[in-house]
Amino acid sequence: MNNRRTVLACIDGSAFSDAVADYAGWIARRVDAPVTLLHNIEHGHSADSNLSGNLTPGEREELLEELTELESRRSKILIEQGRRMLDSAYQRLLDSGVTKPALLQRHGSLVDSLIEMEEEIRVLVVGVRGESHGREASVLGTQLEPVIRAMHRPVLVVNRDFQRIPERLMIAYDGSEAASKGLDMLTLSPLYRGMECHLVHVGENSSRDQDILAEGVAILKQAGLEVTGSNLTGDVEEALLQYQQSHNIDLIVMGAFGHSRLREILFGSRTLSILSNARIPLLLLR
Amino acid sequence: MLLHSTKADWFGNIRGDLLAGIVVALALIPEAIAFSIIAGVDPKVGLYASFCISVIIAFVGGRPGMITAATGAMALLMVTLVKNHGLEYLLAATLLTGVLQIVAGYLKLGNLMSFVSKSVVTGFVNALAILIFMAQLPELTNVTWHVYAMTAVGLGIIYLFPLIPLIGKSIPSPLVCIVVLTVVAVMAGIDIRNVGDMGDLPDTLPIFLWPDVPLNLETLMIILPYAVSLTVVGLLESMMTATIVDDLTDSNSDKNRECKGQGIANIGAGLLGGMAGCAMIGQSVINVKSGGRGRLSTLAAGVFLIVMVVFLGPWLSLIPMAALVAVMIMVAIGTFSWRSVTDMKQHPLSTNIVMVVTVVVVVATHNLAYGVLAGVLLAALFFANKVSHFMYVTSELDEAAATRTYQVVGQVFFNSADKFIDQFDFKEVLSKVVIDLNRAHFWDISAVASLDKVVIKFRREGADVELIGLNEASSTIIDRFGVHDKPEEIDKVLGGH
């Protein structure tokens, strides 16, 4: 059973690490997949500032030794810290009833580690911000966007504590090919069974919009999911967030970065702006 | 993606990169002037080159944090071109160098660096240091005692100033050396050569200039040999420097992108009145030591350099050459791998010979490419010789049947082919000879030819010859080793079949 794809939770000691572990545990129990806890050791720059600007005999060798010494000490501390974080997350998962989560530590950038492991990942669970950002800041972690872009797996972005088992999910649906694929993925996964699905389409509520929505609702109904469809109007982001609040939604499911890079550079990315404003976890389907 | 770079490449280390950029710019100015003088052009040619190349490579280079500018290795190759044909031909050669380097990048010639062994790299670095030192000697011959005194004081400042607590590690000592010696020379009114005597300094930002040469075959024939040398040396030093920076920063670089980047940077330099350049070992080490890691450090070095040069122009011309010589001697001493000399006792003789030959050939020809070529060839010969020892033949006689079975084990190729033939006793009277090749590897046609020879000789002596496992033994001859790049395939070929 070792070759089953795993729910990968990124633990980094940020305020969301516990929540990341909890959500990963929830998904793992629902879809009956193993959990892997990953702590990634980023190698920062050694903040050494010897500005003497001269080259002594044997400078290269000495510098190499000096930097190696410095980084080795720092790495050892980071490994130790990471191990403690992993142990605490491990315990959390065991308590919640997950069997034997795997623990993993990797060196290098998070994106690189994830790309290497992509084949083994079923769902990726990450916190919205890393440990270098405060908890309340409404900024996104600097690694989040590259991670989401690099992954071709569902990514659950965690931005609050695990308060209760999610019961209501909202699916943002625009009728595009990518969104239909997302719906197909949804119907195949056991994760959403028994949850109350809200399929939401934002448009002008024209007959075309209604057709799109009806089509989406039909797909989900056919798969045996309990689904409510709603046509919303107005600004996409605002409408979605308002709906989420008024219906007490626990989880948003949507596609990510559907538009071209150029369009995003010019108009900003919708995914990013929803990510930074949503108060509840988002599951991004890639 | 030639312009692709991550945010971390640029802004991962802003403070460190900016500070390091200033330190590097201060060190680049004397070097660019010194290398211009080596090449026989005005100091502004080297200064413009260093500015353009640093700025462009910050965007297109494959090794963030590596310093690229006008270098001594390249300057030495231009001497005769400048002397015989003038600056315009140098600019044209610089453009052509850029084009050739871009082509090399697309042909992925960066991968060829794997043929350059460690001892060749060491030889290259040592030879470079010696050439930089030797280039300072004209400034130290036929001069008054003032020059010697100033150079000695300059070196004293460079090495001792950093030992002063607090300020020693926050002010670049080469800068202190230059400022102190300039002030002394001006105040005391000592009549010695200064930078102003060596040619024009920049007074404006560089401007776009198409080299003023006739666009014909004759021009191409003049510049092509120089451009090829510049291309090879530039890429060699850049690849080696990239490896050094990789090691120091414990990160990877894209060598083929660096080749293309060097080409683009040289084209930029050629169009803005600069000479060809490449990555600099000493400066890159200074950059890393000062805390520079990202692309920003390279960009900052270029921008600070041009700002300082344009605004301090009148002052620059007052710098005594003795101060530059002191800085360059420091660069030579710092670039030289002193450990390679002490390590010679432990290293095998063949390694030492490769290193020394590389150095000697470079010093004799003033062309680093020839030294590397000699070093690589020599290293390959030594390797072939070593591998040829990995071959032996055992045999067993079945007296009743007058049959001898030879078993060949190991590597048979051009260098071990004669040794292979010598292993057989053709004088022995036999009715049958069996040659078991199951544990042998035939690497080339020489090996096959030697086997033919053995078979024919035995036949002439009247013995029947049977070969066992020839197909397996010769499967290593195929040129396209790509066929065997899976572990199980390699095992099949190398592991006793």
Image (cartoon, coloured by chain):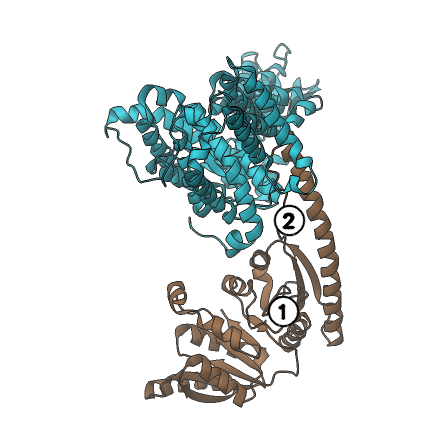
Local SS, label 1: loop
Residue at x 76% of width, y 70% of height? A91
Return the x and y of residue B362 as percentages of the image width and height.
51, 20
What chain is colored brown? A
Residue at x 62% of width, y 43% of height? B170
Residue B42 appears in the rendering: yes
Q: Confirm whether circles 1 and 2 share one chain.
A: yes
- Relative to residue B403, is residue B238 depicted above or below? below
Residue type at numbered disc 2 = Ser
Residue annotated with mark 1:
A134
**Quadrant containing the C terminus of chain B in the rendered view:** top right
What chain is colored cyan? B
Local SS, label 2: loop
Chain under label 2?
A: A
Residue annotated with mark 2:
A46
Q: Who is closer to the viewer here, B342 or B23?
A: B23
How dense is the environment of label 1, judged by Cα within 10 Å: few (below 14), some, or many (20 and up)? Answer: few
Among the 4 quarters of the image, the one containing residue A123: bottom right
Among the 4 quarters of the image, the one containing residue A201: bottom left
In primary-sequence order, the first of circles 1 and 2 is 2
Q: Who is closer to the viewer here, B304 or A209?
A: B304
Residue at x 40% of width, y 84% of height? A234
Mark 1–mark 2 distance (CA, rounded to whole Å)? 23 Å
Return the x and y of residue B342 as percentages of the image width and height.
69, 23
Count of residue discs = 2
B445 left or right of B169 in image: left
Residue type at numbered disc 1 = Gly
Return the x and y of residue B399 as percentages of the image width and height.
71, 17
- Relative to residue A191, is residue A243 depicted above or below? below
Return the x and y of residue B227 as percentages of the image width and height.
37, 28
Q: Who is closer to the viewer here, B245 or B437?
A: B245
